Amino acid sequence: MNPDGTEILSVLNVSTRYGLNIALQDINMVVNKSEVVSVVGANGAGKSTLLKTIMGLCPVYGGHILFQGVDISRNDTERIVRSGIAMVPEGRQLFGPMTVEDNLILGAYIHLGFRRPKKDVETNLEEVFNLFPILSERRKQKSATLSGGEQQMLAIGRGLMSRPSLLLVDEMSMGLAPIIVKQILQTIEEMNKSGVSILLVEQNVKVGLQVSHRAYILDKGRLTFGGSSEALLADEKLISAYLG
């Protein structure tokens, strides 16, 4: 889907740290409505910290984060999820002993908390199953018994159960076979076409840039590039300097 130029997420001069160690410094970036944006960088560059900061899991020590024009910089994670942001964490972090269906229902807790009709959650489930038919076949299976690719599909599906306007995806391709990565990339594109804006963090540069409209390079907690994914892919010197 073509972005419409309206900023859905604005990160303004944001800094954060772990103890005395600076993890992110003066980060400025935007995600527009209906846009897929990639953040790429070497291991330890601060990519996951950026997503955790947006989600309220790491404190903002400086700057502001705006979501749909509202400052969420000091909101707790639950309030951020209720505002319309969801995250697919690195490592998936599924509840292994629970079934596929129960993991998905947990993703809809904000609807259940507001006593939304059960049919709303059922509708969400069916939409996820349409996106990932294999999960429908495995709906009563414990998530720990799924393959790595199926677990990643489940983690994405769980994130979608809250009906987010913005989905953060952390290291989508990690540990997956290329054919599975290709399937999930196609799903990312389908989600985007349905109107979900996506901020994708990837260590695999080609994977991240293949599906995104724009990209940022994060290096040692600082942004060193921001522009079209096409331009970055074409700049071999930039990729060599920052991404190896």
Image: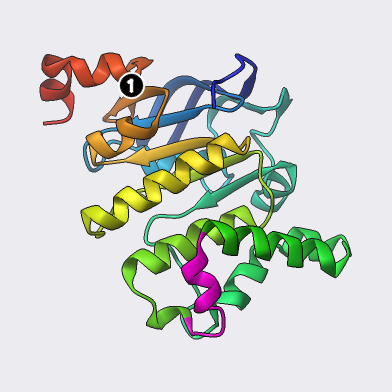
Looking at the rendering, the stretch of residues picked out in magenta corresponds to 132-142
Circle 1 sits in a helix, a strand or a loop, which is it?
helix
Q: Position of residue 72 (x, y in %)?
A: 68, 34
- Which residue is nearer to you in this view: 43 or 190? 190
Amino acid type of the residue tagged 1 in the rendering? Ser
State yes or no: residue 134 in magenta. Answer: yes
Residue at the location (50% across, 56% down)? 156
Residue at the location (37% across, 61% down)? 91
Residue 122 appears in view: yes
- Check disc 1 and report the residue beneath it: 229
Q: Position of residue 197 (x, y in %)?
A: 57, 34
Q: Position of residue 128 (x, y in %)?
A: 60, 60
Compared across the picture, whether 38 is left or right of 131 comes to left
Q: On the rendered image, what quadrant is the N terminus found in?
A: top right
Which colour style is shown? rainbow
Residue at the location (36% across, 52% down)? 183
Image quadrant where residue 226 sits = top left
> Can you say whether 200 is above or below 79 in the image?
above
